[in-house]
Every structure is written in C-alpha cells, then in structure tokens.
Amino acid sequence: MRLLLVEDDRALGQGIRVALGSEGYTLDWLQDGVSALHALRSESFDLLLLDLGLPRLDGLALLQRLRGEQLDLPVLILTARDGTAERIAGLDAGADDYLIKPFDVDELKARIRALLRRSQGRAQPVLEHAGVCLDPVTQQVSWHGNEVVVTPMEYQLLHQLLARPGKVVTRERLSRALYGWQERVESNTLEVLIHNLRKKLSTELIRTVRGVGYVLELKA
C-alpha cells in the first residue's frame, strides 16, 4: 500500500516513516500543502496522512480542495489541534478520521488498517483468494492453509494483486506501490518478484499481461 504523509515536523515525519516502513507500507513524505496538492493530482495513493498546520497551504484548505475536485481517498488527519471545533471542521471538510498529537504508533497503525479496509469495502482485514490468504495485521501469507515465507517486497506485491483479483494491475502502479519516490526501480525488479511468488504459490496464479502489468487469476 502506498501512503502519502504531509507533515512539516521533520522529527515526527521521520519517525512515522520508519514506523510504517517496518509494517511494509510504501510511504512518500512531503512537508507543505502545495507540493502535496500537486502530488495528489498527479499520483495514485491509497491513503493520506495529513497535518493541518502546514506551510504554503493549510491542511484544512488542502483537504477542501481535494474533496472539491472529487479526489477520493481515505484521509487521516494528524494534528495537535485538539479542540472540538477543529475536529468537527476537519471531519466536515472530508476527513475520514482524526488523531491527536502526540499519539501512540500502534494506534496510528490500527487506524490506517481500519481506513484501508473500509476503503476497499472489507469488514475483515484478511484477504483470501484462490487458496491464497494474506493477513495485513500479522503480515503472514498462506497457500491452502500452509504458511509461506515471503519477503517484504513480495508481500507488498501480493497485497496489491489480492486487493484486485481478476483485474489487471499496471506495472506503473505496482512500481509506485513498492517504491514510491524514494528508490530507483531496476527494470527487472517486478519480474523477479513475480517469479518468486509463482515458485512459492503457484505458476498459474499470476498471469502476465504483456506490456501492461499482471493479474491475479480468478481460478488457480
């Protein structure tokens, strides 16, 4: 899952990036509202973590623009503004949840999981399809009931495909979900990861759509 953090406190931003990176999320981090607006208009993210007290464009104004432009993604506000009026304003502007600073990292992770489940129309966290089971809470993967050891990158790639069974996921979307803006993607990285998943699960589970991307077959 690819998340965008918009936070101008460097220490807090770095701490969140480390904490969520250890959970397997791909986290892109920006520190002002204008840059975030440009990124959200041009890139695809699964969730937005938004501070309100931002330079160049306030977080509340950014959120209002996003919703006004029909940009639909879950938004979790992270702010020190703890008054009832501020919370109401953030929710009325289109936020899905609100977390007051300072917050517990485990609570942040739980709220992110809940918002992602809700956005994908799932009440339960576990993804299951064609014999594959993936649990985002424990980050465990099984194949017909047998645990399969996967690397963090393999896990993220499988998560992207399992969230959209039967639908083609483009190479660009997969690359962004795995790396964001932080790293240079080698030309054969996706092929290697797909090859490894086929060996660990089934050679017939993931189909290549030449020149476009990959699709998790409806039957395997």
Image (spheres, grey):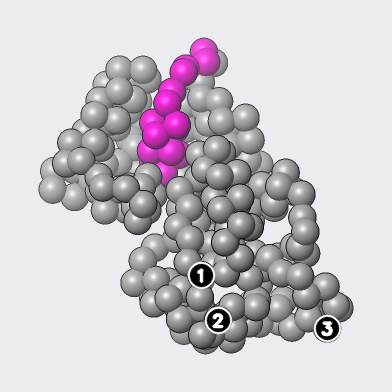
Residue in front for this viewpoint, 129 or 40: 40
Name the residue at 30% across, 23% down.
Answer: 196
Residue furthest to the top: 146
Is 43 left, or right, of 88 in this rendering? left
Mark linked to residue 85: 3
Is 158 left, or right, of 136 in this rendering? left
Residue 38 lies, in percent from the top left, at 39, 77
Label 2 sits on residue: 55
Dots 2 and 1: beta carbons under 8 Å?
Answer: yes
Residue in front for this viewpoint, 142 or 55: 55
Q: Quadrant of the C terminus?
A: top left
Q: In the image, is residue 154 part of the stretch drawn in magenta?
A: yes
Taking 129 as reference, is 115 above or below it?
A: below
Report the number of numbered marks.
3
Residue 5 lies, in percent from the top left, at 54, 62
Name the residue at 63% across, 35% down.
Answer: 137
Give the residues drawn in magenta, as a range. Answer: 146-162
Numbered disc 1: secondary structure: loop
Quarter of the view holding residue 98: bottom right
Inter-mark Cα distance, 1 to 3: 25 Å
Inter-mark Cα distance, 3 to 2: 21 Å
Label 1 sits on residue: 31
Name the residue at 43% across, 71% down.
Answer: 40
The earlier-in-sequence mark between 1 and 3 is 1
Name the residue at 26% across, 53% down.
Answer: 172
Residue in front for this viewpoint, 195 or 204: 195
Q: Name the chief secondary structure element in magenta.
A: helix
